[in-house]
Image (cartoon, rainbow, N blue to C red):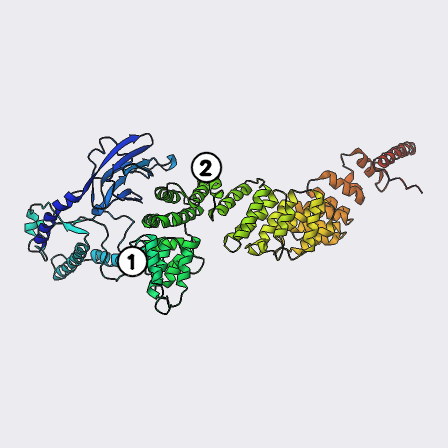
Amino acid sequence: MTRLFAAMILLLVPAICAAAETAVVRSGEHDGFTRLVVYLPETTEWTLREEPDRVTLITGPEVRFDTSTVFPRIGRQRVRDVLPSRGSEGLAIILNCRCGLRTETLVGNVVVLDLLDPPATQLETAAPPPPAEPAPPDRMELPVPVPLRTIPMAEARRVTETATRSLPDKGSPEASADLQAFETEILKQLSLAATQGVLSASLSPQPRSPEADRTADLPGAGRTGPEDGVIVHQNTLIPMETEPRPVDASGIPCITNDRLDLADWRGEGTFAAELGRLRSALTGEFDDPAPATARALARFYIAYGFGAEAEAILSLPATEDQDSEILRSMSRIVDLGHDPDPSPFDSQRGCEGPAGLWSALAGQTGAMPEAEISSLLHELNALPPPLRTHLGTVVAANFVAAGNAEAAEAVFRILDRTDEAGTPRSELAKGQYELEHGDRQTGRALLDQAAGREGDASPEALLALVRDDLSRDMIVPEEVADRLAAYFLQYRDTPLAADLAETEALARASSGQFEAALASLASGKETADRIADVTETRSHVVRTLAQNTSDPDFLKHALRLADHPEEKIAADAADAIAERLLDLGFPELAATILQNNQPLREDSARAQIAARVSLGLGRGRRAEAELHRFQGTDIAELLAKTQAANGDHTAASESYRTLNMPEQAEHQAWLAGDWTRLSGSDDPLRAALATLMTPDGTVPEPDRGPLSSGRRLLQDSTSSRSTIEKMLDRYALPAEPQN
């Protein structure tokens, strides 16, 4: 039977080769990149698939490739090999580095592929693998697996355990039984592969080796002769039966590919023809919707990117089946770019195929392992072109938000091949990418283009531009804030409304429009109700107000905040307002602001402000009690001021001395009458006063005679009069008011 199968293959080969067309591959080496030019037949459709170690130009088996002139012109620094891909689906370019890819299509269906050097910091040139030893002719050769496709987890675990378990002693009956069981498993997989078309007969049989003759009597020997050799075309053997189903990393069954086949959902005719056919069959004799047709129409809308229309069709009665929730989630993803509701794709994280792509879209996921990224890019490339462009921009934006610049760049290359002119959405995604990870000026130029076009991308592009300005503390012009307000009215019923309202308020604050900014954030305002954390947004405006406005304007807005205790602000914003009010001499107003916005916990910063408020209100003892709970240099200095204000000059002098502030310490000692501390002062007047104010009127000295004592008393009297005159000059009393 096997010989008959091989003979049939031999008869079919000439016919297949006659029908195939040849595409010549040229090459050239350039500074910074290697160029491959593929001259495809003009009627051939093609796509590209990117994987970590290769790029595959997918054309189908009807095209043969002539690569005979490739390597005489280029080295192998970037390209390890160029050969037909597995399964003869196209041309595989095996990479020798993590090269970037640039593509261009010329007239006549000429595909230009430029393999670019990676950035200098990421240049990794893989060493060529060691030459593989030739496999025995009667053995099956399996290619190295790539992360794009894998055997289902349960199946892989079962086969691996069978292959690696401990075997009994060689030659025992148990060893022969185990060998037979393992051989049966291999033959089962080979039969499955042949049925699926992933195996074909070897057309170059090798002569039988002496080793094969010596092992002819082993169990199972003779089932495959030299003419029965096989070549594996693919690295994946997919079981025909439904069990075991593919599972994700958590063991949850993955949604199968046939339930997410968007190419089939589009139908065979044109858009208008298929839409007309489905809509005419939507209702039956009594205008009741036909459930199967309704679901087919919903799938049709999803495949063409009409999410809202698909969701409306699915709301019709009698459309429920096992895929209804899947279709509703896909409708929301196509319409919004993600699924805000619980989605059946939430449990598909880690699945390969379309389920993994839709799972990443549903959860706005941009952080994932490299194997999942490769699978996602492959599935994105397989989407119909309009939907590929629409969802590709969403995927790129998710990668940008996650900081995955390399994956985002790969998506942009797919978008460039799909839509050469560029759409507002693609310009938006690329602009955000350049703004975060590339050239700021290029990013702003792309965002300017997207903001100037009509459509949903325009307000998002404007938001990105304004936020970039705010991040650099730039002033946003008033007319830009007015444009944000207009967009809010237009998109008030969409998730974009919150971002528009918040950014408008911050933009107005940056240009000094505090009255308009705070009014838009007032309680009961529609703009304030849409913002998720209106307190933080209001606090940001208030912080800017405390720093960048004149005293009259500041007092006007501070009075408004004091009169509206329901409009809360964060503790640090309240502290900023209170400190400026204290500097202006309004402790009562500062106390009201603090009382309206009590922090969840007290800290030293708030204690200092509260102490200053208490001092301003004449509550020195309360201020001192506030400060005794905390420590630190700032706390100690304010405590000394508080002690002085309370009249405790001795304690204040000691506090200042501890802080190494001698001038303030001596001043407090002077006010306290602590002459002993002042006797060693560097200030001659204070030292003289300390001498004058000792208990005996003089500095204690040994006994002297009467004449000497009299002369000393006369000198002391003159010195005391001079000291008192100097003291009165330094501390002159205010003149009495004239009647």
Q: How many marks?
A: 2
The outermost residue toward the bottom is 286
Name the foreground residue: 556 vs 630. 556
Regarding mark 2 in the picture, which secondary structure is present there?
helix
Question: Which amino acid type corresponds to the residue marked 2 in the rendered image?
Answer: Thr
Mark 1 crowdedness (10 Å alpha carbons): few <14, some 14-19, many ≥20: few
Residue at 62% x, 46% y: name it.
543
In this rendering, is residue 157 above or below 406?
below
Q: In the image, residue 721 lies at what x, y percent? A: 89, 34
Can you give x and y, in whole percent of width and height, for residue 238 in the image?
23, 56
With 688 as the anchor, is 267 left or right in this view?
left
In the picture, the quarter occupied by the C terminus is top right
Residue 699 figure quarter: top right
- Which quarter of the image is occupied by the N terminus? bottom left
Residue 735 located left or right of residue 270 = right
Percent of width and height locating residue 229: 12, 49
Q: Horizontally, is 259 left or right of 317 in the view?
A: left
Of 16 and 217, which appears nearest the observer? 16
Q: Nearer the viewer, residue 191 or 18?
A: 18
**Mark 2, other Cα within 10 Å: few <14 / some 14–19 / many ≥20:** some
Task: Pinpoint residue 124: horizontal percent, then vertical percent.
Answer: 33, 37
Name the secondary structure under disc 1. helix
Question: What distance separates the C-alpha of mark 1 from that of mark 2?
Answer: 42 Å
Q: Residue furthest right?
A: 739
Residue flagged by tag 1: what amino acid is it?
Asp
Q: Which label belongs to residue 103?
A: none
Query: Would you say residue 351 is visible in this rendering?
Result: no
Label of residue 442 in the image = 2
Q: Which residue is mark 1?
A: 258
